Image (spheres, rainbow, N blue to C red):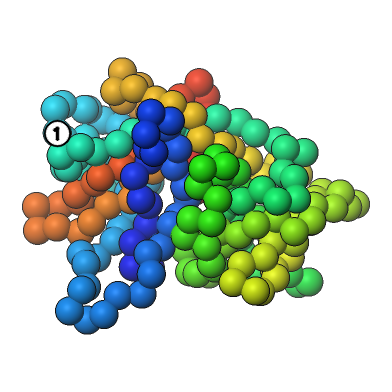
């Protein structure tokens, strides 16, 4: 799918994350472990293991790497999206341009990280675009944003009801049974290996 997904969820003391941040292309000799996404609900959390029931119905044990990072998501609004913001938008192609499935408004410190548009696995044929908002126009059917990345532009409609979130802090106390998680992980012989976890709290779940 893509080379890597998320960098650290923390930069210094501030909890920040992204929906999807691919690394630069790597040479064959630098190939890293295959990247996978774990989406589901926590069954148990103990020490360095997070047991998750995935959206596919399978229960998996996710090993948490040394120094793993944790963050959550908080509700935002379409009206919070302003020209110059850096966003991550999962979308599906539709007539006249893409339609958003979810939007993450990046913290300012993450502007430019993972810039680009690439395949994503939220739904079949979906893509993820990390880009700067060139303009945001309110239309009859919601808002359409024009985003720019690497000298290219893309128009994405954000229908009413589309989840819009930003990053919020989290603690290990939030890793309770039933909490929804999004985990970008490496595929390892012993199962998924994670350096980052994004957990839902206060009724807000990671939509990516």
At 65% from the left and 57% from the top, the residue drawn is 132
Say if 24 sits above or below 163 in the image: below
Q: Nearer the viewer, residue 51 or 19?
A: 19
Q: Is residue 27 left or right of residue 204?
A: left
Percent coordinates x, y for residue 50 in the rendering: 21, 35
Seen from this angle, which residue lies furthest top?
Answer: 173
Residue drawn at 15 percent across, 52 percent down: 191
Q: Secondary structure at mark 1?
A: loop
Q: Is residue 41 visible?
A: no
Q: Which residue is mark 1?
A: 48
> Where residue 10 sits: x, y (%)?
37, 37
- In this view, the residue farthest toward the left is 190
Which of the 4 image quarters holds residue 3?
Answer: bottom left
Q: Residues within 10 Å of mark 1 (few under 14, many from 20)?
A: few
For residue 89, say whether it is visible: yes
- In this rendered view, identify the residue nearer to me: 153 or 119: 153
Residue 130 location (% of width, % of height) = 56, 59
Task: Please report the residue visible at 48 percent of the width from the left and 56 percent of the height from the top.
Answer: 113
Residue occupying image coordinates x 69% and y 61%: 147
Q: Quadrant of the N terminus?
A: bottom left
Q: Quadrant of residue 34?
A: bottom left
Give how far across and how far down residue 4 sits, in percent: 33, 61
């Amino acid at each position: 799918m893509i080379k890597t997904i998320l960098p650290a969820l923390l930069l210094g003391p501030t909890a920040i994350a992204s929906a999807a941040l691919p690394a630069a292309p790597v040479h064959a000799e630098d190939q890293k472990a295959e990247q996978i996404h774990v989406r589901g609900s926590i069954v148990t959390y103990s020490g360095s293991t997070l047991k998750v029931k995935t959206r596919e119905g399978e229960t998996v044990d996710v090993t948490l790497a040394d120094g793993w990072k944790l963050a959550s998501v908080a509700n935002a609004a379409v009206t919070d999206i302003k020209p110059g913001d850096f966003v991550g938008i999962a979308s599906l192609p539709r007539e006249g341009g893409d339609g958003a499935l979810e939007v993450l408004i990046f913290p300012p410190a993450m502007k430019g990280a993972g810039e680009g548009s690439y395949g994503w696995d939220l739904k079949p044929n979906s893509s993820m675009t990390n880009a700067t908002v060139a303009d945001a126009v309110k239309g009859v059917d919601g808002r359409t944003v024009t985003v720019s990345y690497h000298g290219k532009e893309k128009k994405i409609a954000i229908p009413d009801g589309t989840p819009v979130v930003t990053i919020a802090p989290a603690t290990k106390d939030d890793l309770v049974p039933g909490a929804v998680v999004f985990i970008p992980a490496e595929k390892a012989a012993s199962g998924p290996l994670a350096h980052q976890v994004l957990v839902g709290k206060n009724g807000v779940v990671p939509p990516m």
